[in-house]
Amino acid sequence: MTVGDGDTLYAFSDNSVYAIDSQGKLKWNFTQPDQWRICLDTGRYFVADNRTVSLAPVTDTLTSTPVIDSSGGNLYALVSPDLNQSEYHLYTIRWRGGIDNLSVVSISPIGRVAWSVPVSGNLSAVSWASIDAQSQGVYVFHGYNETLIDKHGDVVWNIANVSDPCAVDDQGFVYTVSAIGRQIMGVNYIVLNDSDAWNGTYFDYREPSSVVSAYYPNGTLYWSHDVGEPIIRQQMWDSVDKQYKTLPI
């Protein structure tokens, strides 16, 4: 559950979204179409203790987290038709791939789909996404891209190779950190865990660089500055922040 604007409580189940007002009355109930999934399995993985002699893998439950925000009574959600699939292998969950075919959906104040816009990128166990709904539109971080979609469902601009969700000031200026790939054996990818090394599976993982850039509200570059050393994500335990595991850049 999460509280949106206008003191609206949004509650998510496997295939439905409920909007509840501050008096506890149901405003609307939206049942997602079969081709969509709002609660995404956005990359939680748990490795069992290989030293145990138990035949059953010691794992936790994979969590499904909605990537959403609200503004003006509209709920904006990241949806996908694909389910994140995994399989047990030698006490470790092995990921076959990420979530792709992503779209941003706007659900109106009466609980109906206003528009949907496809966005590029892939969510895997080492990446994430976010939605920030503001007066200018919806800022969507996905697949190391930042995209602004206006309230009518039109893409205003896209900024590529962004390490983390952008910051937006009161005038609509956008601030980002460029992404850089982590080098492993000369390749800009990171191995998720030992089991994936066995089958040669790699994931696109990028880190913040040392370059901070500012953009005008229309998406054109305002300035760019190299601070001289990589900007570091402040990591957090899952119990503190289950969605991103990091403080804002």
Image (cartoon, rainbow, N blue to C red):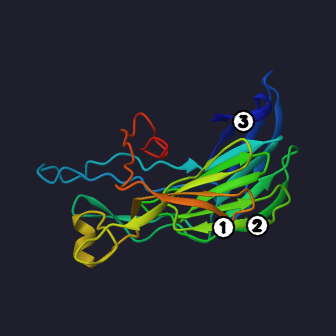
In the depicted view, which residue is nearer to us: 131 or 134? Answer: 134
Q: Quadrant of residue 153?
A: bottom right
Element carrying mark 2? strand
For the residues bearing labels 1 and 2, Cβ distance under 8 angstroms? yes
**Residue 145: image x %, image y %?**
57, 65
Please tell me which of labels 3 and 1 falls first in the chain.
Answer: 3
- The mark total stands at 3
Please say whether residue 181 is visible from this viewpoint: yes
Three-letter amino acid code at disc 3?
Gly
For the residues bearing labels 3 and 2, Cβ distance under 8 angstroms? no
Three-letter amino acid code at disc 1?
Asn
Q: Is 34 left, or right, of 146 in this rendering?
A: right
Element carrying mark 1? strand
| Disc 3 to disc 2, C-alpha distance | 23 Å
Element carrying mark 3? loop
Label at residue 155: 2
Give the foreground label among 3 and 2. 2
Which residue is at 71% across, 66% downward?
Answer: 157
Q: Quadrant of residue 150?
A: bottom right
| Disc 3 to disc 1, C-alpha distance | 25 Å
